[in-house]
Image (tube, grey):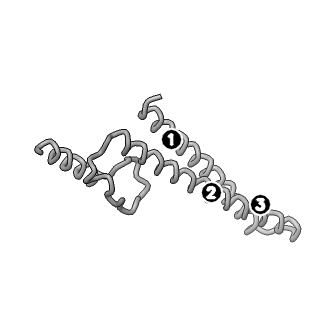
Amino acid sequence: MDALTIIQNKYKDADKLRTVAHTSTEIYEELQFLIDRGGADDNKDVLQTILEKTRRLAVYWFASGKAMDGEAKELTTKALKLPTSVKFLEDEIEKDKDMVFTPKVVASIQQARYEESML
């Protein structure tokens, strides 16, 4: 299995996790609506427990998806065999970008490769 296939599989897995996270978020919001609307006290306690479990599940899935994105980025970095001068670039604050590297990082990589080729 080549690196591209592995990386693509990582991103597909992360997307699946985000889909599950969105679904659990919808369940959370619907349960919150039911709790806010009111009802029997017994039902409210049960719904509150379900709501908390759903919230934790959603957080877990989103975090797992983010971790898989990081793993895919590591694999991408290794597969590209980046020059040592750009391997340790610090990531900027992520804003849920779809790209593995920001345009600024890509420019740095290209500059480093150019400089290496000139040596």
Q: Residue furthest top?
A: 1
Circle 2: residue type: Tyr
In the rendered image, residue 111, in percent from the top left (x then y), is placed at 18, 49
Answer above or below: position of 36 versus 28. below
Q: Which type of secondary structure does the marked residue at label 2 adopt?
A: helix
Circle number at residue 88: none
The mark that comes first in sequence, 2 or 1, is 1
Circle 3: residue type: Ile
The mark that comes first in sequence, 1 or 3, is 1
- Left-right relation of 19 to 113: right
Q: Which type of secondary structure does the marked residue at label 3 adopt?
A: helix
Q: Pointers 2 and 3 in contact (CB under 8 A)?
A: no
The mark that comes first in sequence, 2 or 3, is 3
Answer above or below: position of 12 versus 40. above
In the rendered image, residue 12, in percent from the top left (x then y), is placed at 52, 39
Disc 3 marks which residue?
Answer: 50
Disc 1 marks which residue?
Answer: 10
Q: Pointers 2 and 1 in contact (CB under 8 A)?
A: no
How far apart, in angstroms, are the residues tagged by discs 1 and 3? 30 Å
- Kindly report which numbered mark, 2 or 3, lies closer to the viewer in this rendering: 2
> Of residues 100 and 43, which is closer to you in this image?
100
Residue at 45% over, 38% down: 7
How far apart, in angstroms, are the residues tagged by discs 2 and 3? 15 Å
Image quarter for residue 63? bottom right
Disc 2 marks which residue?
Answer: 60
Residue at 43% over, 43% down: 75
Near mark 3 (Cα within 10 A), the count class, few <14, some 14-19 or many ≥20, is some
Answer above or below: position of 2 versus 29. above
- Left-right relation of 109 to 18: left
Circle 1: residue type: Lys
